[in-house]
Amino acid sequence: MAPKNSRDMWDKNPKKPQKNSPKKTDNKAENTLRMTRWNAFFLAIIFLPLMWFMISPPHFGTEVNKDVSLPKIVANYSGGLYSEILISWNLIEATYNKTSGTDQTIIDTSLIPAGTQITELWLSNPANPTQVIIKDQKWSNLLLELLPSILSTLLFVGLIFFLLSRMSIGGANGPMNFGRNRAKLYDPEKDKKVTFADVAGSEEEKNDLVEIVDFLRNPDKYKELGAKIPRGILLQWPPGTGKTLLARAVAGESNVPFFSISGSEFVEMFVGVGAARVRDLFAEAREHAPAIIFIDEIDAIGKRRAAGMWGGHDEREQTLNQILTEMDGFDNDTKVIVMAATNRADVLDRALLRPGRFDRKVTINLPTLEDRKQIIMIHAKQKPLASDFDIDRTAALTVGFSGAEIANLMNEAAIIAGKQDKKTITQKMVQLAVEKVVMGNEKKSLRMTEHEKKLTAIHEVGHALVGKLLPHTDPVHKISILPRGSAGGVTWFLPEKDRTYVSKAKYTDELACLYGGRVAEEIFFWTEYITTWASNDIEKATEIARAMVMRFGFDEELGAENYIASSEDAFYSEGNRKNISEKTQNLIDEKVRNILKSAYETARSILTKYHTLHITISDVLIQQEEMLQEDFDAYFTDIVVPPKVAM
């Protein structure tokens, strides 16, 4: 009968540990710390006498006269040479009379023969005028005299303990601890357990990971079929889509030790430290095998290695080489799975992505409409929603949002409700939260003049009119002349559904829409009075036109050829171009310029034709400051508007 789970199977091997609990790591740390404390104790024993002598030398430098014998002391005492005698512990401190011309002397009683009663010696001559002070010689007085020395010694011992503990396992940043990994071992009893039920959407991605969990639980089922467990799983693409959340769900479902660490935690200023941490991490994971290692943001150490004299000896490359060796080296008998997450899979080294290392690549895309509904419901569970809350409307407003952005949206809606002293979250509050996330906060303190309001209204309505009357643009959701974020006004186009790819026709119409604001300024305020308002629109239009020619192959004469440097180039960036001739470069510039001119003329023809409507809508917008989609569409009831085409 096959074991119920992977833990039962590995328990049969006497060479492997019987428990996969974090206590093993804790015992190792405790043993190291205990050894460090014993070392500190022995050092304290060695340095104690030395420090005592250095900190508290005998009598603090007072000269001790060891040449005075006991008979001489008695003779001087009897002759009245001393004005005062202090008997303390093993010393006799005698003060001469002023007439003797001598200040003071100290006699060491160690020279006095054993058995001599010093106190009886002085008390035997009570008639002598010399004042004799016999100091109490109890242990309490002794300790009082030695207290400064004891405190100084204890302070020194405490300093030794502190320094050694910083260099031990107890101090994560200690100088002797550079080579130890800093991975966190997931503890389901202490950490909040996450399962696949807590991850909304991403059903296909979860299925890929469910197989890994099932393999860890029932390895025999797959081994009988000759299947091998994947060595590595790479979670890739857009930020905020739930890569780390899926990794936590795997930890909660698999019930095996789960080590999590960030890629940046391997890299230090000293070459070789990252490689040492990788070795230590994999060694610890093998002790707990079967186990999972999760490396977040692996691109911090897994970037493509540079060729030539620039590579080979830097810290990041040494760390990458060690990871490659640990994942698929000579030791093929491993039960450690490596999971990693990155937003830049295109920059990772090829050796890291080959089969045998990261065998499975899970691409987590932005959530679809149905996925967004599930995500909204998860983040709305602990929030009081009003009766008018519309999940379908909210999901439609969040096209292009990631899971993290939706979570932020619902949190912003709750904050808005709190600021308004409301007990529930209404749909209007969600709408305000969407506008805040997408367009930024309203700048109510910024006061615009009447001319600036008119200019803003003319500019924004220009965008809206061109977008409304072209078939391949998104519907106008809202127009506002209120300053938001870095913009003085906003025209918000909201797609009706999710989009996987973009057509040439859509890009062409979007270019005309982007030029709608600049063309409107020229028509209403003449060329001499146009402003810098459209600078961002012109920048976006130029980027799109250049991508259409150089990347997407939309020009018939230049053909379907990419004229931008490949991402495999060590010096790759979006602006880099391939090695092309000057003639071809001039042709590319000419094609880009023609596309932009065509879009400009399209916008001018539409705004010239509907000049009166432009004025009407702008006047209303100046008064209302904002206009929603329903109010804007009402002006086109008597106008033939081409139907919207999705692509």
Image: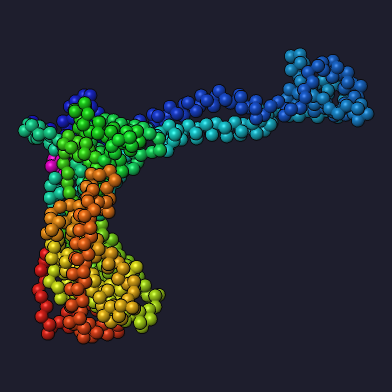
Residue drawn at x 50%, y 28% is 40
* Residue 1 visible within the image: yes
Left or right: 134 with respect to 487? right
* Residue situated furthest left in the rendering: 225
519 and 358: which is toward the camera: 519
445 and 451: which is toward the camera: 451
Q: To which quarter of the image does residue 418 belong?
A: bottom left
387 and 125: which is toward the camera: 387
Residue drawn at x 30%, y 31% is 279
Q: To which quarter of the image does residue 88 belong?
A: top right
Q: Which residues are magenta?
A: 209-214
The image position of residue 45, as x and y in percent, is: 55, 24
Q: Is residue 514 above or below residue 269?
A: below
- Say whether residue 201 is magenta: no
Q: Main secondary structure of the magenta part?
A: helix
Q: Quadrant of the N terminus?
A: top left
315 and 408: which is toward the camera: 315
